[in-house]
Amino acid sequence: MIPSTLSNDTIVALATASGHGAIAVIRLSGPDAIPLVDAVFKGKNLAHQPSHTLHFGTIREGDQILDEVVVSLFKGPASYTKEDVVEVSCHGSPFITEQLIKLFLKKGARLALPGEFTKRAFLNGQFDLAQAEAVADLIASDSALTHQIAMKQMRGGFSAEIKALRAQLIHFASMIELELDFSEEDVEFADRAGLRRLITTLQKLISDLLQSFEMGNVLKHGVATVIAGKPNAGKSTLLNALLNEEKAIVSDIPGTTRDVIEDEATLGGIRFRFIDTAGLRETLDTVEAIGVARTKEQLQKAAVVLYLFDVTSTSPAQLQEELQQLQLPGVPHLLLANKKDLATPQQLESFEHLENLVFLSAGQKEGLEELQQALLALVHANEALTGDRTIVTNLRHFQGLQKTDEALQEVLQGLDNGLTGDWLASDIRRSLYYLGEITGEITTDDLLDNIFTKFCIGK
């Protein structure tokens, strides 16, 4: 468990990934970080050097040289943790890093726990809790869009919106609290009509943030894109073409795919989870029937559906019947007319009137570029991805906003029922509490431990 309060310990950890590499970085933070490294560093006296400088030398244990290193010096409060921080760049041998860390431990440091550097940064006021969580999201980002969202949150975009909401509520809460001090005079300092307008405005802003969570969650974990269609439509061939590898078994025998096959690819900076499914048809085969049932389950959870059909053997009327049976109200989808290389001009022309249609040949890898562009356009059509809008990606933040909204609704009901100031103040304080939990202005030991123990050691 990470200590819940700041300590005078100097902590050390490997800040780069474990394993062999050209360079490894060992990070130390705390009041003794500089003298501790100075005691084993043969080079310039680090205590006498300015902050944000690099120094070449050797790390020695007695007369034995353990490695040639470059030491980066960051003196508090102008450092990540706002403490004195030293980063030792050494050769990336696991044996060397182990020897150096053992030496620093022997000199008085202790091993850092997961997330302890970032927790110290939070406790020292470097940034708030929402920004600290964005650090973990930034490390985990695997596409241009998730990187962009994490960067905005780490730089305080989301926090600024929450703090602005909280500041407005604090003003009214203070006015109502003032009324309680003058309760015998029966004076109203807080304009009730103004409070109602503020609550309504805040609820609209919170509603927008809550709605963004669905898309934010999708982007964070990958856009669940289900490839569906009749047996032998070419679904597995399409999956292999999109991934550019032989992920799924391809056969002319209908019903070859009997289970869900899933893999990921990044298109246009967005991570997609492509899910190949069993062909949709009535079957007496027990195993295939289970696969069809799982296909229907995946369709219910899909963010996007790619419905594939064989353009050489399907009529427009048959396609409409298949789509009606599929029942995808409100689910973004594309219709993929496969095997266009084998179709007649008349067959292709009969489908040209349909919206969201892409002609392709999965087997020949024709039309994949058009499919990718149409897929990206479908995702980008979601207004959460347009402009500079804040997107909520963290479940804890989402739950905090939900509780805030519920508390604000209680304030409105209290105004409707003519409740006295003390009751209104209680509901406003609850909403302030939940907003404060998001940014870390209000915390508990369990909350901090739950957040920071999920970080990697060294961060």
Image (tube, rainbow, N blue to C red):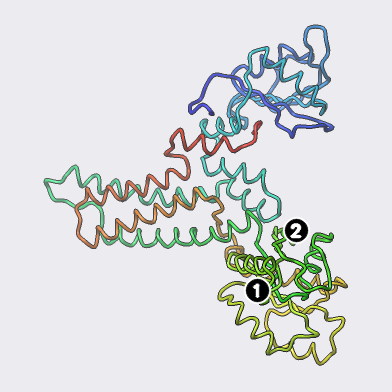
Q: Is residue 35 above or below residue 377?
A: above
Q: Amino acid at mark 1?
A: His
- Between 145 and 239, the residue placed more toward the observer is 239
- Between 167 and 335, the residue placed more toward the observer is 335
Residue 111 sits in which quadrant?
A: top right
Q: Is residue 287 left or right of residue 443?
A: right
Residue 121 sits in which quadrant?
A: top right
Q: Is residue 127 left or right of residue 374?
A: left
Please tell me the numbered disc located at residue 333. 1
Residue 201 sits in which quadrant?
A: bottom left
Q: Is residue 247 left or right of residue 75?
A: right
Secondary structure under tag 2 reads strand
Tag 2 residue: 265
Q: Measured from the top left, where is residue 157 in percent x and y?
A: 55, 50
Q: Measured from the top left, where is residue 440 in percent x and y?
A: 47, 40
Secondary structure under tag 1 reads strand
* Mark 2 or mark 1: whose residue is earlier in sequence: 2
